[in-house]
Image (cartoon, helix red, strand yellow):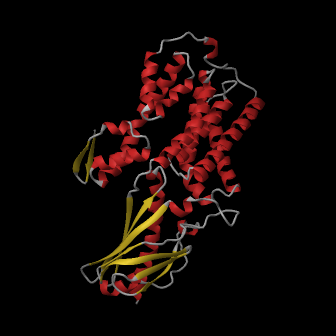
């Protein structure tokens, strides 16, 4: 169970046994949502569970790996620890297998310091294999599985690093530092290849870079540790690479409903709500953006107009990539305006040497569902204007990508609200 403190109150979240056999991360997230009770509990429970699970994952994997070697079977069998349901059977079998004698000479590679030229040659080969795997995995997940899940953004970098860290230490132990350097360089080269092949743009790769680099460097440590164990560990690295697409396909065959996230931004306007309202339902051309983030190609608001009046009217908010079409669902002047989003443009123009980038996530990953403006009268004749957007995010890990999406939505809100403030105070 997990005990959470939310808004000054404590919420007790019971961990159901189904969580341990749920086949995908998405399914587990849905179960947590149902069990946690409140959205606030879910927001805190998910990252807490991830942090809490890390040491147990390491213990489970390392013990399964060592027990497989101890039983005289291929160490990659221990990686079946990650396969839901089947992992319990594997653990039971590993517990019953007898210990077998092994050739101790094969347990660890030599410790002699290699020549620099030899290190460089093996490092180049390791980087090439690692980066190639990253490109192939990206193409498979994006164009075949149509999945932007944890297998791509978390598992991919880790396995990339493991491949590089293992290969650079494969024939002779060279240490963790060269392995980590290989992981870092391979992740950067992989990103460069994705740009060259028009599979991604510079901005999206910059957003994923902290996650990818951390995963690749961490995976390189794992790969080096496997190489240090000696004979047979290459099968473990190969198994990791082969199993990753299977894990990625899990979320495709077992989809779940996406949660709606909300972002609210507010501003104080030195004008009464009645003077602010006309600038909320429609506003004139905005000046060029000064925000550095909105100058990176991200879709940026330009102007807004409305056709009709009251519920059923349609508001068109023009962005640099096209219009948002927003049928009015709440019309309560001068207090509240609510609308759905039935059409939206591409979220950005990618920075790329090509006119067209084949990145499907630009179309269906972040979807705006609805929005609202709330005008709250203040003492002295002012107005507190709140803008809220509700959206879904079909990309994992969601907590990481929400850092970016919430930031972008806040910046867009701020640009619009400041413009409405200037129009209302000077009009």
Q: Quadrant of the C terminus?
A: bottom left
Is 279 located above or below residue 346 in the figure? below
The x, y position of residue 328, in whole percent, is 37, 78
Residue name at image x 42 percent, y 82 percent: 422
Is 226 located above or below residue 212 in the figure? above
The x, y position of residue 140, in whole percent, is 61, 48
Horizontal side of 242 relative to 264 (left or right) equals: right
The x, y position of residue 62, in whole percent, is 49, 26
Determine if residue 56 is in view: yes
Residue name at image x 55 percent, y 40 percent: 244
Horizontal side of 250 relative to 329 (left or right) equals: right
Residue ranking furthest to the left: 9
Determine if residue 272 is in view: no
Residue ranking furthest to the right: 117
Is 139 located above or below residue 201 in the figure? above
Q: As rendered, which of 118 and 368 lies closer to the eye?
A: 368
Q: How many marks?
A: 0
Residue name at image x 56 percent, y 46 percent: 212
Quarter of image, res 290: bottom right
Residue ranking furthest to the bottom: 427
Q: As rendered, which of 77 and 120 lies closer to the eye?
A: 77
Quarter of image, res 163: top right
The x, y position of residue 268, in whole percent, is 34, 76
Residue name at image x 42 percent, y 76 percent: 326
Residue ranking furthest to the top: 101
Q: Quadrant of the N terminus?
A: top left
């Amino acid at each position: 169970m997990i005990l959470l403190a939310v808004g000054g109150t404590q919420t007790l979240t019971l961990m159901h046994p189904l969580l341990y056999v749920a086949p995908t991360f998405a399914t587990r997230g849905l179960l947590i949502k149902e069990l946690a009770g409140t959205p606030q509990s879910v927001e805190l429970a998910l990252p807490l569970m991830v942090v809490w699970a890390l040491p147990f994952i390491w213990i489970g994997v390392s013990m399964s790996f060592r027990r497989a070697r101890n039983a005289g079977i291929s160490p990659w069998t221990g990686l079946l620890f990650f396969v839901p349901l089947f992992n319990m059977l594997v653990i039971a079998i590993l517990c019953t297998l007898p210990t077998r004698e092994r050739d101790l000479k094969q347990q660890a590679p030599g410790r002699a310091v290699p020549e620099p030229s030899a290190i460089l040659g093996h490092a180049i080969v390791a980087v090439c294999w690692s980066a190639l795997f990253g490109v192939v995995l990206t193409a498979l997940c994006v164009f075949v599985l149509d999945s932007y899940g944890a297998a791509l953004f978390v598992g991919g970098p880790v396995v990339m690093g493991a491949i590089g860290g293992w290969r650079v230490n494969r024939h002779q132990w060279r240490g963790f530092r060269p392995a980590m350097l290989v992981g870092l360089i391979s992740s950067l080269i992989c990103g460069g290849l994705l740009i060259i092949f028009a599979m991604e743009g510079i901005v999206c790769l910059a957003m994923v870079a902290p996650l990818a680099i951390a995963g690749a460097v961490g995976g390189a440590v794992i790969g080096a540790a496997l190489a240090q164990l000696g004979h047979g560990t290459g099968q473990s690295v190969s198994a990791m690479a082969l199993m990753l697409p299977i894990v990625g396909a899990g979320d495709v065959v077992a989809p779940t409903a996406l949660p709606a996230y909300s972002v609210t931004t507010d501003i104080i306007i030195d004008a009464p709500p009645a003077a602010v309202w006309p600038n909320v339902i429609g506003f004139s051309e905005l000046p060029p953006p000064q925000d550095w983030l909105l100058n990176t190609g991200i879709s940026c608001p330009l102007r807004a107009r409305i056709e009709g009046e009251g519920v059923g009217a349609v508001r068109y908010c023009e962005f640099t990539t096209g219009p948002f079409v927003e049928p009015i669902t709440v019309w309560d002047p001068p207090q509240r305006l609510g609308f759905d989003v039935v059409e939206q443009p591409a979220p950005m123009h990618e920075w790329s040497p090509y006119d067209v980038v084949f990145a499907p996530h630009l179309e269906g990953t972040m979807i705006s569902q609805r929005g609202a403006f709330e005008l709250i009268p203040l003492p002295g004749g002012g107005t507190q204007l709140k803008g809220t957007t509700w959206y879904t995010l079909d990309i994992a890990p969601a907590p990481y990508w929400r850092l970016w999406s919430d930031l972008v939505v806040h910046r867009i809100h701020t640009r619009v609200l400041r413009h409405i403030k200037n129009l209302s105070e000077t009009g």
